[in-house]
Amino acid sequence: MLGFDPLYFIILAPALLLSFLASFKVKSAFAKYSKVRAFSGLTGAMAARLMLQSNGVLDVQIQKVQGFLTDNYNPGNKVLSLSPDVHDGTSLASVGVACHEAGHALQHAEGYAPLGLRSTLVPVVNFSSRAAIFVFIAGIMMQLQPLTLLGVILFGAGFLFAVVTLPVEWNASARAKAQVVNLGIVSPDQEGAAGSVLNAAFLTYIAAAVSSLLTVLYYLLRSGLLNGRRD
């Protein structure tokens, strides 16, 4: 169990393939539509600010951060961080990603329940991701099934977080897709292209959920909790 385990890769293979496909699609879509200028000519930062202001959200700070597609919104300090290509870019890809993150800020301002639940789960998942493997191994070595089960439950926290993330990300993208057209950021005929990057990005969250589920399945099998035997 502590060394190379072929079963792990057999079970996780679908998730690994899906993750690879999702990453490829995101990079391909961003590269393609980063070459197409948005109708309005606004940068990603300007588009995000317009979307926020148009919805009465005036207390969110927009900042530039280093990296590629490192864009995120932090509900804790109301900071919307955009990568350089998104912050300064005027392409369909840039405004699409920026407005998606602005969608999270709108969720926060409106008290969108799934976002609140995800934020609540963050410290739980941070702890469980570090502790799960140690608790699980301790349970196996000490032959304490309740402790082993606790390790599996800790792995399950990651799956719960991934599932809660799905509606949060889908809703943020839906808000962005609607408002980039309504606000004139992109023209109606550019709507589909602007949403392509967001659709590809959503696949990465599906891959994460599948990976988390299969990880739990693996540890259930290895613990004997699922098949009645321990390896």
Image: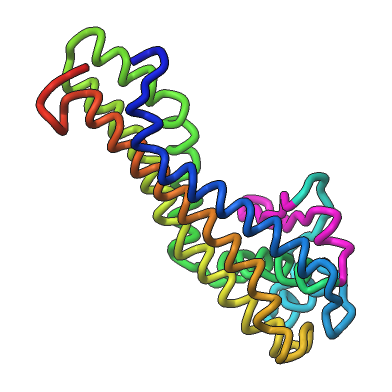
Asked if residue 99 lies left or right of residue 225, the reply is right
Residue 209, percent across and down? 42, 50
Residue 170, percent across and down? 51, 68
Q: Is residue 184 above or below residue 95?
A: below
Q: How is the image coloured?
A: rainbow
Asked if residue 148 lies left or right of residue 179, the reply is left
Query: Residue 154: which quarter of the image?
Result: top left
Quarter of the image where the N terminus is located:
top left
Q: Is residue 15 above or below residue 92?
A: above
Asked if residue 228 lies left or right of residue 222, the reply is left
Q: Residue at x 80, y 60 (%)?
A: 62
Q: Residue at x 70, y 76 (%)?
A: 194
Q: Is residue 98 above or below residue 69?
A: below
Q: Residue at x 56, y 76 (%)?
A: 174
Query: Residue 46: which quarter of the image?
Result: bottom right
Residue 157, percent across and down? 37, 40
Asked if residue 31 lies left or right of residue 210, the reply is right
Quarter of the image where the C terminus is located:
top left
Q: Residue furthest left?
A: 228
Residue 78: within the magenta? Answer: yes
Q: Is residue 90 above or below residue 137?
A: below
The foreground one among 14 and 67 is: 14
Q: Residue at x 25, y 24 (%)?
A: 222
Badge count? 0
Instruction: Please report the bounds of the magenta region as a residue range.
Output: 69-90
Residue 28: within the magenta? Answer: no
Residue 191, percent across and down? 68, 84
